[in-house]
Amino acid sequence: MEIVTNSRFNTTLSPTARKEPIGSPVPDFGSVTTDHMFIAEYAEGQWVNARIQPYQNLAMSPSSSVFHYGQAIFEGIKAYKQKDGSVKIFRPEKNWERFNTSAARLSMPDVPRDLFLDSITELVKIENLWVPDEEGSSLYIRPFMIATEELLRVKPSDRFLFMVVLSPSASYYSKPLNILVSDHYSRAAVGGTGFAKAAGNYARAMIGQTEARNQGYDQMLWMEVPDYQYIQESGTMNAFFAIGDKLITPELDGCILDGVTRDSVIQLVRHMGYTVEERKISIGEVEEAYKNGTLKDAFGTGTAASIAPFEKVTNRGFDMILPPVAERPFSPILKDKLDKIKTGEAPDIFNWMVDV
Ligand SMILES: Cc1ncc(COP(=O)(O)O)c(C=O)c1O
C-alpha cells in the first residue's frame, strides 16, 4: 500500500481507491462510504496515533464501554463541489465547537481544534474524486467519538477513538414534509442531553419516527414534556414558523440541538432585514395563526436536508395545510440563498466556507 508523506497525518492509501470522479446517480444519503477513514486514539489523557487509512472494520472487545453505557457522540458536516471545481466545507468550526460541547456533557475528552479540522480537510482532500457535482449533492462528513475502555463497570471511560468517515450524498428530501406532532413520547427534557449530538438521543427518538412513518408522516415534531404544548424540533431538524412577517424558532433551552443550519438561517434572515424571534413557541400559537390566516411558512433546517418545507402539520387530529412552497416568504428564498453560498454561486458574505 502506498504511504503518503505530505499529509499532516500518517497516511496509507488503499490500492483499490476510486480512480475516476464519482458520476451520477449519486448514492442516497449515508448508504456508501469512501475508500479511506481517519482514526485517532485517546489514552492517558492524550490523542495519539492519528492516521488516515483504508476504510476498514474495527476490532473491539465486547467489553468496550460504548456497547454498554453509550458514550458516543457524532457530527454531520458537508463538503461541496464549487462552480470552479474546487471543494469547500460549510462551517466546520461550528461543528467542532458543538462536538466538544457534546463531549463535555457525555464525560468525554475535548478534541483539539486542529485535530478536528485537519482530520476533515486532509481526508476530504484525499477523497476529492468522491465529491459529487450533481445538483443538491455533497460529500457528507461524519466525525464521531466512542468509548473503548474494556470494563463492564459503569464509569466514564478513559480510552476513546475519534474517527471520521465520508459518504457521498444525493439531495436529501425531494418533496415537502408531512409532520406529526408528538403527544406521548419525548426526545429530550431539561437537564438531559438534548443539546448534545449524542447517539442515545437518536436511539430514543426512533420509536417516534417509526410511529410517524406508520401513520403516513415523514417526521415527528418533538414537544416539551410533560405538557406537549411547546415545540422543540422536527425529527433531526430545527423548526421554523413564519407568522405574519416574523420568523419564529424555539430558543436554545438545553433540550434542542444548536443547529449550524439554524444559526445560518437566523443570520441570513436578519441580513435580509426581517425579524427572527428565538423564543418558546406553542403549537396553540401555530394553530391560532393557521386559523386566522397568518401562518405563512413552516420548515425544518439541518445539514442533511438544508431547508425542508413542511406541507402538513397534524396536532391531535387537527391538520394544518401550508401554502404552496413557491408562494412562501422564507423557505424557498432561504434554500436558494444557502445552496448558492455553499456551491460558490453567491458571495460568501459571512465567511462560512472553508477551503480544502
Ligand atoms: C436532533 C437534530 N436537530 C437539529 C439538527 C440540525 O443541525 P445542523 O443544522 O447542525 O445539521 C440535527 C442534525 O443534523 C439533529 O440531529
Image (cartoon, rainbow, N blue to C red):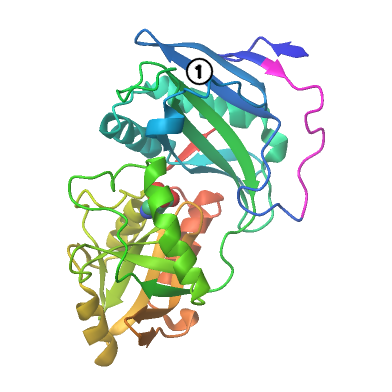
Question: Which quarter of the rendering shows the C terminus?
Answer: top right
**Residue 236 visible somewhere in the drawing:** no
- The residues colored magenta run 12-24
Q: Is 346 included in the stretch rendered in magenta?
A: no
Helix, strand or loop status at disc 1: strand
Q: Is 23 included in the stretch rendered in magenta?
A: yes
Q: Residue at x 66, y 39 (%)?
A: 33
Q: Which residue is mark 1?
A: 40
| Residue 333 occupies quadrant | bottom left
Compared across the picture, whether 201 is left or right of 161 comes to: left
Pick out the residue farthest to the front: 152
Percent position of residue 54, x then y: 69, 23
Percent position of residue 11, x then y: 65, 15
- Relative to residue 257, is residue 297 depicted above or below? below
- Relative to residue 318, is residue 217 depicted above or below? above
| Residue 68 occupies quadrant | top left
CA neighbours of label 1 inside 10 A, class few (<14), some (14 to 19), many (20+) = many
Compared across the picture, whether 53 is left or right of 312 comes to: right
Q: Residue at x 43, y 60 (%)?
A: 207
Report the label total: 1
| Residue 141 occupies quadrant | top right
Q: Residue at x 65, y 27 (%)?
A: 57
For the residue pair 185 and 288, the one nearer the viewer reads as 185
Compared across the picture, whether 46 is left or right of 89 comes to: left
